Amino acid sequence: MEKISYKLEVFEGPMDLLLHLISKHKLNIYDIPIVTLVEQYIDYVRRMQEEDLYVASDFLEMAARLVYLKSVSLLPVYTEAQELKEELQGELIEYRDMKLMAEKLSENTDGFNSFVREQEKIDIDQTYKRLHDPQELFAAYVSAAGRKMRQMPPPIEAFREIVVKKVVSVGSRISKIFSKFSKRGTKTKFNTLFDDAQSRSEIVATFLALLELTKSKKLKVLGDGDETQIELLDESYSEISEEWN
C-alpha cells in the first residue's frame, strides 16, 4: 500500500503556529482550551520530526511550556495555571495584532519592502563662525597645554635641586653641637642648637646627632617644651663624630 504523503505548512515561529491552530479548530483566543491546544501543537511538532524537517529550538521550547501549563492546570489549586494561561493569551493577542498590522502595511507598499531615493549633493559651509570669549580660549589653551606637558618627561631643572643638594653628615652636626658648649656642665637651650641649620638635611642631621649623644651619655636633656635645656656631661666626642662621618 502506497504511503500517503502530505506537505506541512511552514510557520515563522511557535506563535504563528498557535494562531493557525486556534483559527483552524475555531478556538476562542480569549478563552483557550489548553488541553486541546497542547494536543494539536504537540501533534504538529511530532509530524515535523517524522518528516525529517528542521524543528527550531523555539518550537520545542513552546512545546515544553504548553506541557507544563497543561500539567499545572490539572492540579487542585491552579492559580499558577491561570496566570500562565493569561500570559500566553496576551502574547498571542499581541502577536495577532502585529501580524494584521504588518499585512496592512504590506498592502500599502504595493509589494515593495523598501524605498530608495537618489543621493542629493548638499553644500556644506565649513567656515568656523562661532565667537569665543578670550578667557574661554585661554582656558582651552591651558587645558590642552597641560595635557601635553603631562605626557612629557620632567625637565632636567626639576632634578637639579635634588642632585646638587649638599648631603649633611651626622658627624658634622655633632661637632656643631659641641661648639655650643664651653665646658662640662654648661647648659644651652634645645632650640638654639638648630639656629645655624639652613636646610631640612641639616635639621634632620642635628636631631639625629642629639639622639646619638644622649644615648652615649655625652649630653643630658632637662625639662620639656620651649624651656628644654641640653647639658654637656662629657667633652669627648671625637670617636662618635668619626663613626657618623
Image: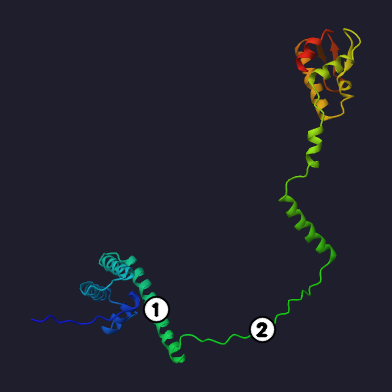
Q: Which residue is at a point 90% across and 8% down the rendered structure image?
A: 183
Q: Is residue 216 above or below residue 119?
A: above
Residue at left offset 81%, top offset 41% = 157
SS at circle 1 = helix
- If you read the primary sequence from the N terminus, does the residue marked by circle 1 or circle 2 appear first? 1
State the image quarter where residue 206 is shown. top right
Nearest-to-viewer mark from 1 and 2 = 2
Position of residue 127 relative to residue 242, above or below, is below
Task: State if disc 2 and disc 1 touch (CB < 8 Å).
Answer: no
Q: Is residue 178 visible?
A: yes
Q: Which quadrant of the structure image shows residue 33?
A: bottom left
Specify the amino acid type for callout 1: Tyr
Horizontally, residue 179 falls left or right of residue 38, namely right
Image height of 168 relative to 57, above or below = above
Q: Residue at x 83, y 67 (%)?
A: 133
User: What amino acid is labelled 2 in the image?
Assistant: Ile
Residue on which disc 2 sits: 122
Residue 163 on image: x %, y % = 79, 34
Q: Which residue is mark 1?
A: 95
Q: Would residue 31 be seen by someone viewing this image from the given angle?
A: no
Extreme residue toward the right, this view: 182
Q: Residue 175 at x, y = what percent? A: 85, 16
- Provide residue 176's location: percent of width, then percent of height: 87, 18
| Mark 1 → mark 2, Cα distance in angstroms | 42 Å
Name the quadrant of the N terminus: bottom left
Quadrant location of the C terminus in the rendered image:
top right
The spot of residue 85 in percent (x, y) is 34, 71
- Residue sitting nearer the eye, 110 or 18: 110
**Label 1 crowd (10 A; few <14 / some 14-19 / many >=20):** some
User: Among all residues in the image, which is located at the extreme front?
Assistant: 156
Label of residue 133 in the image: none
